[in-house]
Image (cartoon, rainbow, N blue to C red):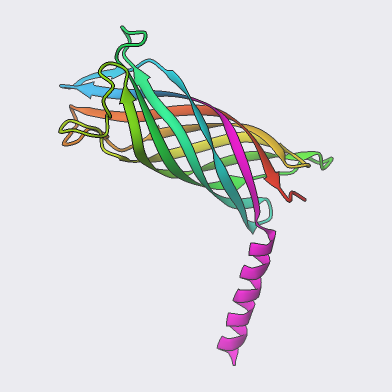
Amino acid sequence: MKKILFTVAVLCIAGAAFAQTTYGVKLGPNFSSMSNKVDGHKETLKMIVGLSGGVYANIPIAPEFYIQPSLMYEGKGAKAKDSDEDGKVRLNYLTLPIDLLFKPQMPNGSGSWIIGVGPYLGYGFSGKYSEGGGDPFKGDFGLKRFDAGANVQLGYEMANGFNIGLNAELGLLNLVDNGDSDNSARNTSFGVMVGYTLGQR
C-alpha cells in the first residue's frame, strides 16, 4: 500500500511540474571563433558573425530553479588572421544545451534575472570553406561532426515573457579527425539572444 501511495505521489508531483513547464523561442546573432593548434603552435582565429535560434523549455525543479533544455541552430566558424574572405570556414550546427537556471524574481514583480550554466552537445550537419567551397565535415582531413562543451547564459526576462540575454559556449572536444594535443581545433562562441516565453505567469 505504501508503495502504491508513493507511486501516486510521484506521479502527481511529476504531473504538476509538467503542467508548470513553459516553452519559448529565441533568436539572435552568434559571434564565433576557433582555437587551433598546428604542430603545437596555438592560434585563435578571427571572429565571424552567424545566426543562432531555436526553442527551449523551462522545467521547474524548485522555487526559482529550472532545467532548461534547448534545441538550437547555430552558425559557427572562423577565419584566418591574415585573411578577409579567403580562409573563412562556416559551420552549421544543431545543438542541445541543457542548463540549470536560477531565475530570482525582482521585488516589484516586473521580471526576473536569468543565470544559467550547463553542458551542450552539437552536431555539424553542413559547412563551407570560402576558399574552394568544400564541406569541412567531409573528406579525409575533415572535421568531426560531433561537438560538446560548456554553456553559460545571463539575461533578464520581463513579466510578460519577453527576454534578452547573452550566452557563451566553450567547445571542449578536439574537432580535428585523428587529432592530438599538438593538432586540434575547438569552437568558441557567444551570442546575443532575444526571446519570448509562452504562457509566462
Q: Say which of 86 and 15 sits in front.
A: 86
Q: Quadrant of the N terminus?
A: bottom right
Q: Say which of 126 and 183 sits in front.
A: 126
Residue 190: % across, % down: 49, 27
Magenta-tinted stretch:
1-30
Residue 187: % across, % down: 36, 30
Placement of 145 over or under 10, stated as above or below: above
Residue 45: % across, % down: 34, 17
Q: Quadrant of residue 26?
A: top right
Main SS category, magenta section: helix
Placement of 8 over or under 14, stated as above or below: below
Q: Residue at x 59, y 82 (%)?
A: 6
Q: Residue at x 78, y 42 (%)?
A: 160
Q: Quadrant of residue 11?
A: bottom right
Q: Say which of 138 and 154 sits in front.
A: 138
Q: Residue at x 17, y 30 (%)?
A: 141
Is 57 on the left-hand or right-hand side of 162? Answer: left
Extreme residue toward the front, this view? 133
